[in-house]
Image (cartoon, helix red, strand yellow):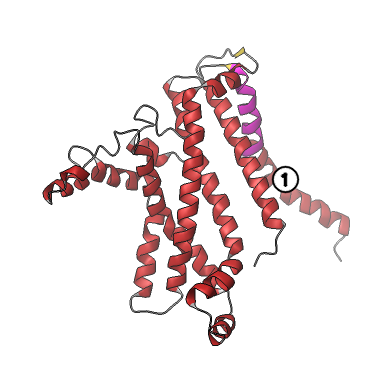
């Protein structure tokens, strides 16, 4: 017979490596980063100059950081909203059997498994204002007035990145929604059809409420993804033109390795972390306050 106390100690022994891993690779870096945010440091020299809250004061006065906050809000609202709506509608379409459905599902999901760097390179070639395929196509068919400097114009550059992100990750939303819909009993749909419900009424009254948990999950993933957005920006615009496409991650990288202001970059990271925590807590409270299926 196994001694209860010994088995309990053995359990703690198995947990210790995980606790060490979490502390070394998660807790300690967070503490170290917070400490750096109160210093002026170039990341090369050993000496750090303590400056208190100066990095944070400068950060919230920084016009580029205001652009970062605006871009984060735009990116989160547009990508999460459009991906959830398109994902739900396309997944609902895939519920019905039709010729080539499996091939269509694979094609829709394919962009989600591609590297963002590769996608950025592809669309950079397409959107290039001088030799890009899109402008060349418009000129070839006599629609020269539609040709534009898509990535060189501050008014359009960030929206191009948003559209590309939507194209890349809608397939992921489709997959999650489709999986959730497969868990809904067909008896509910059959009963609704017998009662004379239209396709829109079935979608509104049965499908959407029963995949609400998936919607919450996609919202959290999408908002956190908006905070972390870096790959497309780095490959396609490097934060330009005129810093119009800067995101938290790209501006933090620029401050850290472009101007060698590690303390300032750490302050950006701390603000980014706080925003992520607040959004996650709010959404989890909303998630737990409702009965989700």
Q: Residue at label 1?
A: 16
* Residue 237 percent coordinates (x, y): 34, 34
In the image, 185 versus 52, the foreground residue is: 185
| Figure check: 235 above or below 213 | above
Q: Is residue 283 visible?
A: yes
Local packing at callout 1 (Cα closer than 10 Å; few below 14, some 14-19, many 20+) is few
Closer to the camera in the image, 290 or 3: 290
Secondary element at image label 1? helix
**Residue at image x 67%, y 46%?**
281
Q: Magenta includes 33?
A: yes
Foreground residue, 192 or 99?
192
On the image, the x and y values in percent for residue 213 come to 61, 62
Q: Residue at x 63, y 38 (%)?
A: 26
Residue 224, given in percent of the width and then of the height, sits at: 55, 45
Q: Residue furthest bottom?
A: 194
The answer to whether one can see residue 256 in this image is no
The vertical placement of 128 against 44, above or below, is below
Does 164 appear above or below 37?
A: below
Q: Which range is magenta?
A: 25-39
| Position of the C terminus by quadrant | bottom right
- The quadrant the N terminus occupies is bottom right
Q: Is residue 201 left or right of residue 240?
A: right
Q: Is residue 230 left or right of residue 276?
A: left
- Left or right of 62, for residue 281: right
Name the residue rendered at 63%, 19% in the picture. 38
Magenta stretch mostly in which secondary structure?
helix
Q: Is residue 161 magenta?
A: no
Q: What residue lies at 59% left-to-right and 81% top-to-bottom?
A: 188
Expressed as whole percent of the image width and height from the top left, the position of residue 56 reads 60, 22
């Amino acid at each position: 017979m196994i001694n209860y106390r010994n088995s309990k100690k053995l359990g703690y022994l198995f947990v210790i490596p995980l606790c060490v891993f979490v502390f070394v690779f998660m807790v300690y870096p967070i503490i170290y980063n917070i400490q750096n945010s109160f210093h002026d440091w170039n990341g090369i020299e050993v000496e750090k100059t303590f400056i208190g809250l100066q990095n944070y004061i400068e950060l919230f006065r920084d016009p580029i950081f205001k652009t970062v906050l605006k871009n984060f809000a735009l990116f989160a609202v547009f990508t999460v909203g459009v991906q959830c709506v398109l994902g739900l509608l396309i997944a609902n379409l895939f519920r019905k059997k039709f010729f080539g459905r499996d091939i269509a599902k694979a094609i829709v999901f394919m962009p989600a498994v591609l590297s963002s760097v590769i996608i950025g390179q592809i669309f950079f070639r397409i959107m290039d204002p001088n030799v890009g395929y899109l402008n060349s196509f418009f000129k070839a068919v006599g629609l020269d007035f539609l040709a534009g400097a898509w990535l060189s114009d501050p008014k359009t550059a960030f929206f191009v990145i948003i559209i590309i992100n939507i194209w890349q990750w809608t397939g992921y939303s489709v997959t999650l929604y489709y999986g959730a819909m497969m868990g809904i009993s067909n008896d509910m749909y059959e009963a609704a059809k017998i009662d004379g419900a239209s396709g829109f009424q079935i979608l509104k009254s049965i499908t959407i409420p029963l995949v609400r948990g998936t919607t919450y999950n996609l919202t959290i993933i999408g908002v956190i993804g908006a905070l972390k957005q870096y790959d497309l920006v780095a490959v396609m615009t490097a934060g330009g033109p005129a810093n119009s496409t800067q995101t938290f991650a790209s501006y933090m990288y620029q401050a850290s390795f472009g101007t060698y202001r590690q303390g300032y970059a750490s302050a950006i990271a701390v603000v980014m972390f706080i925003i992520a925590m607040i959004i996650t807590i709010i959404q989890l409270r909303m998630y737990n306050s409702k009965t989700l299926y």
